[in-house]
Image: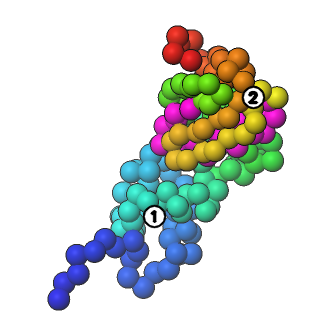
Amino acid sequence: MLSLRAVDHAPGMKKPDRHEAILQLLSSHSIASQEDLRRLLEERGWRVTQATLSRDLRELGVVRAPTDDGARYVRREMLGVDEDKPSLEALLPQLFDAVDGVSELLVLHTLPGGAQPIAEAIDAQSWPEIIGTIGGENTILIVCRSSQARLEVAQRLRAMAGRRSSPRT
């Protein structure tokens, strides 16, 4: 009987082989989206879901970072910034979408895949107004010390991203 379940690999190939294929593609192509990478993998015989591809990129330390040609997927060590981590100033203009908050809580929305590197970069800033961050795929919860701190952090993040202030936050 024919199985209709999604295939997350090429027959006979293992996860390390898929990771190697991803790294080879990243070193030989300028890849702007996960869909572009998925298509290139498919041309090599790999059929992967978006969830598998996101997990692979995270495991490989691949981030979407600004380049002269726009945001592209690169390995963290290729960035050469602060122990292989991109700076907040470099990430926000490329990955920032919106920020909103209430009370001491601030929610920063990013482009897909942008939350983890931005959350790490915010944590690395050690801003005294921030207690901590929790980053998902495209959303970061930022816990601030006060409502006033939330307003200041939101304004600083917008300025770093090159966005104007919003009356909502």
Q: Which of marks 2 and 1 is nearer the N terminus?
A: 1
Q: CA separation, marks 2 and 1?
A: 36 Å
Q: Where is residue 92 in the image (x, y as percent from the top left)?
A: 61, 30
Is residue 121 visible in this depiction of the protein? no
Figure check: 129 above or below 31 = above
Query: Image point 39% across, 71% down: which residue?
Result: 8
Figure check: 95 above or below 46 = above
- The local secondary structure at tag 1 comes to helix
Task: Work out which residue is located at the far bottom of the displayed protein and give it.
Answer: 1
Quadrant of the image occupied by residue 81 = top right
**Which contiguous range is marked in magenta?**
107-127
Figure check: 138 above or below 21 = above
In this figure, which residue is indicated by the disc labeled 2? Answer: 145
Is residue 29 visible in this depiction of the protein? yes
Q: Position of residue 22 (x, y in %)?
A: 52, 62
User: Hey, what amino acid is under mark 1?
Assistant: Thr
User: Hey, what amino acid is under mark 2?
Assistant: Arg
Q: Nearer the viewer, residue 69 or 136?
A: 136
> Is residue 52 part of the magenta span, yes or no?
no
**115 on left or right of 123:** left
In this figure, which residue is indicated by the disc labeled 1? Answer: 52
